[in-house]
Amino acid sequence: MTVIANRATDRHATCGDLILVLNCGSSSIKFALFDAGRILLSHAPVWNGKVQGIGGPAPTYDETGTVAHAVELDAQHPHTAALSLIRERVGTRLDGRRLAAVAHRVVHGGNRYFAPAKVDAGVIAELRELIPLAPLHQPFPLKAMSLLLEQRPDIAQVACFDTAFHRTLPRVEQQLPLPHALWERGLRRYGFHGLSYDYMTAALPARHGNLARGRVIVAHLGSGASLCALQDLASVATTMGFSALDGLMMGTRTGALDPGAVLYLMEIEKLSLAEVGNLLYHQSGLLGVSGLSSEPRVLQPLEARGGAEGARAGDALALYVRRIVREIGALVAVLGGLDLLVFTAGVGEHSAFIRERVCASLSFLGITLNDVANADNAPLISAADSRVMVGVEPTNEEWVAARDALAVLG
């Protein structure tokens, strides 16, 4: 295995050093290397890639300049094996340069971590206590941190939190209508997808000028989905709350759901806590309503084909769009109007038909689209006479994590 060389006595990043970003999920790990000396000049990594299908029958690996190919991972410890593979590949890319830090995307920072933090055993222990708040996401970066801390304690690690961006939410947006004692114990609305929204605060002013400092709604639509209302580039409201189950309907997650339905499932349908959790996180959303797929791009042609499957696909897409439109309407009310609507993440960046359906339902705001620009996923997709500008902006969570790690290192 290639050795990643470091000088243990020097923790400050300098020109020529590299920062590795790991975005660890339940079935995939994305990674990217950034030049520490150019992070503020360029948002592009010098090299990146991903391992997908971790824990499944056919995991794949790809990196800059290659196509995905099958890899073998230890079936008993697939995440450990995937991290070892990435570490080996990173080692071959250093070419004598120093790895200054590893930055990790962490979904939940709780009510303590509102800024990027250097990782040590104590930080890992505290973040492990938050696993029940984000069971789909929290365990996996912690595993990567623990392994690296054990094997390479000389390499600085920085945890970057999705919840931290929403520290600007006013108290009224953080509170849940529960007894005050539960607020004091941490039951509140945190908000998520913060690294993505943080990136928008850098990208949107460069693209749209002062308009980006006005009344802005960003729609982060991927397998997970949320909206964020920005005023002067700060989060003032968001659709995800206490957990990543809240808000919009998603690929396999419910989004906001009457808690009475959960009580019914447990009391009348006799589902266990584990079964309810699996239903809400893995069997609902687009997949659950359609019974066919969690992907809008798969459901659209099925809807057009008609028949029983087409009807279910149509129901799923209609509900998906309706929930987005309803939540955008609520955020417009909070903002007192809307100047700029931006779509980002996998669905937001690439699904022209979802954007068209959402914006058609928002025509009362004076939104009109340029159909050609929308079909091309252009940066600006609104028509010239649209009263609200509508854009498409690719997100870059890895760059935000690298930038924040550089700031922590000093």
Image: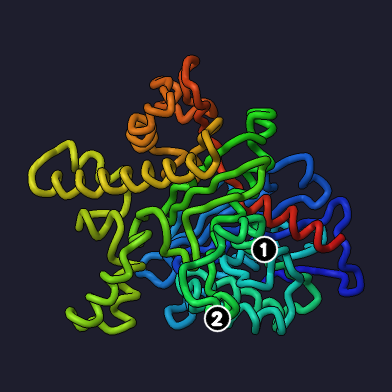
Per the model, the C-alpha gap separating discs 1 and 2 is: 29 Å
In the picture, the quarter occupied by the C terminus is: bottom right
Left or right of 88? Residue 288 is: left
Which residue: 15% across, 44% down? 310
Q: Position of residue 139 (x, y in %)?
A: 53, 76
Amino acid type at circle 1 is Cys
Decide: is 122 above or below 339.
below
| Residue highlighted by disc 2 | 181
Q: Residues within 10 Å of mark 1 (few under 14, many from 20)?
A: many
Which residue: 77% across, 50% down? 35
Decide: is 62 above or below 125.
above
Mark number for residue 301? Answer: none
Q: Which residue in the rendered view is the most extreme toward the left?
A: 307
Image-quadrant location for residue 53:
bottom left
Q: Position of residue 241 (x, y in %)?
A: 49, 62
Q: Secondary structure at mark 1?
A: strand
